[in-house]
Amino acid sequence: MYGLYCLFVLYYLRVGAVVTPTLPSSQEQQAYAAILKALADVKQSRVNLAAQVIRSRGEFDTIKGQLIYFEDSCICGRNNTIAFNSFLSKNTSSFGIQQPIYFDNITLNIGNGYDTRHGLFRAPRNGTYTFSTSVTTPASSQIAVEIVKNGEQLVQLRTINDYTWSMATNVVNVNLIKGDDVWVRHSAIGDANVLQIDDGLYTSFSGFLVHA
């Protein structure tokens, strides 16, 4: 109020008024106080708004980062199929211990995970995979093989020495990191060491991605 009163005094002194200045009326004081309050409210609103903008920008950056993460990790809408089937194309024998078995007849290789040059599967992406292998031996013969991951045994199987040809199959689920290798190899010495196809797709190695 004092500021408004001083303005009145300066005005009267400048124009040479002879009227004695008086304090603003009660109504004027209330109006002035209302103006000051409105200005203070506007100022505070601007401060609050600026703070809200900063918070909103931070929340936006956080959400943006989460969206980028989920977009990178989600394979929804993409062609996420990885699967292969491979077979022996001819009777094979004389395997050494831990010698890889090369399945050279490829009937399916979606995602190009199966390496046709080396007869192994190399994981194109992280995930849970299922692999199976079947081996067939002629009469009076047996063989032991295993599915391995990076050289470490996952499962093994063995045919029986019988009067007719025999077959063994095993299946395994395994978590792989992109670049991990899985293959089938001979695992024993002293068996008949013979695999046959018997004019059909009996000796095989296959796998597929279950979940990424």
Image (cartoon, rainbow, N blue to C red):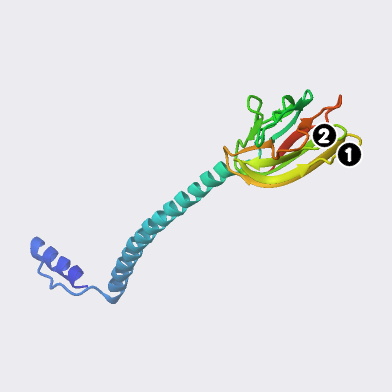
Asked whether the residues under the numbered discs 1 and 2 touch, taking CB atoms below 8 Å apart as contact, a structural biologist would say: no
Q: Which is nearer the N-term, disc 1 or disc 2? A: 2
Residue that badge 1 annotates: 162
Residue lying farthest to the bottom in this orientation: 26
- Height in image: 207 above or below 104? below
Density class for disc 2 (Cα within 10 Å; few <14, some 14-19, many ≥20) is: many
Density class for disc 1 (Cα within 10 Å; few <14, some 14-19, many ≥20) is: few
Amino acid type for the residue under numbered disc 2: Thr
| Mark 1 to mark 2 CA distance (whole Å) | 12 Å
- Does the image show residue 174? yes
Rendered location of residue 163, percent (x, y): 91, 36
- Height in image: 14 above or below 91? below
Q: Is residue 201 left or right of residue 151?
A: right
Rendered location of residue 85, percent (x, y): 75, 31
- Residue 79 occupies which quadrant of the picture? top right
Disc number placed over residue 148 in the picture, else none: none
- Residue 178 occupies which quadrant of the picture? top right
**Mark 1 or 2, which is nearer the eye?**
1
Amino acid type for the residue under numbered disc 1: Asp
Rendered location of residue 176, percent (x, y): 61, 44
Q: Nearer the viewer, residue 166 or 38?
A: 166
Number of residue marks: 2
Residue that badge 2 annotates: 136
Residue lying farthest to the right in this orientation: 163
Q: Is residue 175 left or right of residue 206?
A: left
